[in-house]
Amino acid sequence: LLYSSEAQAQKARALVKPGKSLNEIASQLEPLNKNAINMGKVERANIFDNAAEAVFSLKAGETTQPLQSPFGWHIFQVTAVEPPSTAPFEEVRT
Protein backbone atom coordinates (compact mmCIF):
# COMPACT_ATOMS: atom_id res chain seq x y z
CA LEU A 1 0.00 0.00 0.00
CA LEU A 2 1.20 3.52 -0.74
CA TYR A 3 0.03 6.59 1.16
CA SER A 4 0.98 10.24 0.87
CA SER A 5 1.48 10.72 4.61
CA GLU A 6 2.96 8.76 7.46
CA ALA A 7 -0.25 9.27 9.46
CA GLN A 8 -2.33 7.57 6.76
CA ALA A 9 0.16 4.71 6.52
CA GLN A 10 0.13 4.27 10.32
CA LYS A 11 -3.70 4.09 10.28
CA ALA A 12 -3.55 1.40 7.60
CA ARG A 13 -0.84 -0.51 9.46
CA ALA A 14 -2.98 -0.46 12.61
CA LEU A 15 -5.64 -2.44 10.69
CA VAL A 16 -3.22 -5.29 9.93
CA LYS A 17 -4.32 -8.46 11.64
CA PRO A 18 -3.42 -12.08 10.96
CA GLY A 19 -5.25 -13.27 7.87
CA LYS A 20 -6.29 -9.78 6.74
CA SER A 21 -5.04 -8.89 3.28
CA LEU A 22 -3.85 -5.49 2.15
CA ASN A 23 -6.72 -5.53 -0.35
CA GLU A 24 -9.16 -5.53 2.58
CA ILE A 25 -7.31 -2.67 4.23
CA ALA A 26 -7.19 -0.73 0.95
CA SER A 27 -10.98 -0.90 0.75
CA GLN A 28 -11.19 0.89 4.11
CA LEU A 29 -8.35 3.42 3.69
CA GLU A 30 -7.82 4.15 0.01
CA PRO A 31 -4.13 4.11 -0.89
CA LEU A 32 -2.59 6.04 -3.77
CA ASN A 33 -1.93 2.74 -5.56
CA LYS A 34 -5.43 1.24 -5.21
CA ASN A 35 -5.27 -0.26 -8.73
CA ALA A 36 -1.79 -1.76 -8.29
CA ILE A 37 -1.60 -3.30 -4.83
CA ASN A 38 -0.23 -6.73 -5.77
CA MET A 39 3.38 -6.55 -6.92
CA GLY A 40 3.63 -10.27 -7.71
CA LYS A 41 7.01 -11.91 -7.34
CA VAL A 42 9.69 -9.39 -6.38
CA GLU A 43 13.46 -9.76 -6.40
CA ARG A 44 15.52 -7.84 -3.88
CA ALA A 45 17.17 -5.78 -6.63
CA ASN A 46 13.75 -4.55 -7.81
CA ILE A 47 12.67 -2.85 -4.59
CA PHE A 48 13.90 0.47 -3.22
CA ASP A 49 16.94 0.18 -0.97
CA ASN A 50 15.52 1.18 2.40
CA ALA A 51 12.63 -1.30 1.99
CA ALA A 52 14.63 -4.28 0.76
CA GLU A 53 16.04 -5.23 4.17
CA ALA A 54 12.66 -4.93 5.88
CA VAL A 55 10.72 -6.79 3.19
CA PHE A 56 13.21 -9.61 2.70
CA SER A 57 13.46 -10.27 6.43
CA LEU A 58 9.72 -11.01 6.67
CA LYS A 59 8.12 -14.44 6.72
CA ALA A 60 5.00 -15.28 4.71
CA GLY A 61 1.99 -13.45 6.15
CA GLU A 62 4.01 -10.70 7.83
CA THR A 63 3.71 -6.98 7.11
CA THR A 64 6.23 -4.14 7.35
CA GLN A 65 5.86 -1.02 9.39
CA PRO A 66 5.40 2.07 7.15
CA LEU A 67 8.53 2.78 5.10
CA GLN A 68 9.25 6.09 3.38
CA SER A 69 10.41 6.52 -0.22
CA PRO A 70 10.38 9.49 -2.59
CA PHE A 71 6.89 8.31 -3.66
CA GLY A 72 5.33 8.34 -0.18
CA TRP A 73 4.80 5.86 2.65
CA HIS A 74 4.65 2.14 1.83
CA ILE A 75 3.35 -0.92 3.66
CA PHE A 76 4.45 -4.29 2.27
CA GLN A 77 2.96 -7.68 3.05
CA VAL A 78 4.67 -10.93 2.10
CA THR A 79 2.23 -13.60 0.94
CA ALA A 80 4.80 -16.28 0.06
CA VAL A 81 8.54 -16.79 0.15
CA GLU A 82 10.24 -18.73 -2.62
CA PRO A 83 13.83 -19.87 -2.23
CA PRO A 84 16.24 -18.57 -4.87
CA SER A 85 16.78 -20.86 -7.81
CA THR A 86 18.83 -21.06 -10.95
CA ALA A 87 17.25 -22.14 -14.22
CA PRO A 88 19.23 -24.21 -16.72
CA PHE A 89 20.53 -22.24 -19.70
CA GLU A 90 18.29 -24.20 -22.07
CA GLU A 91 15.20 -22.94 -20.21
CA VAL A 92 16.10 -19.26 -20.35
CA ARG A 93 17.76 -19.10 -23.75
CA THR A 94 15.84 -16.81 -26.11
Image (cartoon, rainbow, N blue to C red):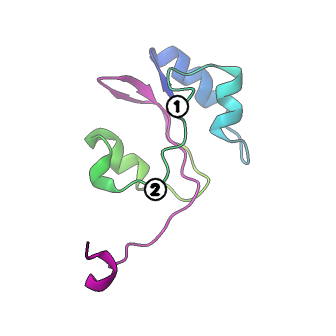
The quadrant in which residue 8 appears is top right
User: Horizontal placement of 61 versus 83: left or right?
Assistant: right
Q: Position of residue 53 (x, y in %)?
A: 34, 50
Observer able to see residue 74? yes
Q: Main secondary structure of the magenta part?
A: loop
Badge 1 crowding class, 10 Å Cα cut-off, few under 14, some 14 to 19, many 20 or more, is: many
Residue 38 placement: quadrant: top right
Q: Is residue 70 above or below residue 42?
A: above
Q: Residue at x 48, y 68 (%)?
A: 82
In space, the residues marked 2 and 1 are separated at their CA atoms by 16 Å
Residue 88 at least partly seen: no
Tell me which amino acid carries mark 2.
Lys
| 88, 11: nearer the viewer | 88
Q: Quadrant of the C terminus?
A: bottom left
Is 70 part of what is drawn in magenta? Answer: yes
Residue beneath disc 1 = 1
Type of amino acid under label 1? Leu
Q: Does the residue at mark 2 contact the one at mark 1 (Cβ under 8 Å)?
A: no
Q: Position of residue 75 (x, y in %)?
A: 50, 34
Instruction: Relative to 48, say whether 2 is above or below.
Output: above
Q: Quick one: SS at disc 1?
A: loop
Residue, x 33% and y 45% (percent of image)? Answer: 47
Give the residue at x 52% y 31%. Answer: 1
Q: Which label sits on residue 41?
A: 2
Residue closer to the observer: 36 or 61: 36
The part of the chain drawn in magenta is 65-94
Q: In this view, does 71 lie to the left or right of 78?
A: left
Quadrant of residue 31 in the image?
Answer: top right
**Label disc, if present, on residue 44 of the rendered structure:** none
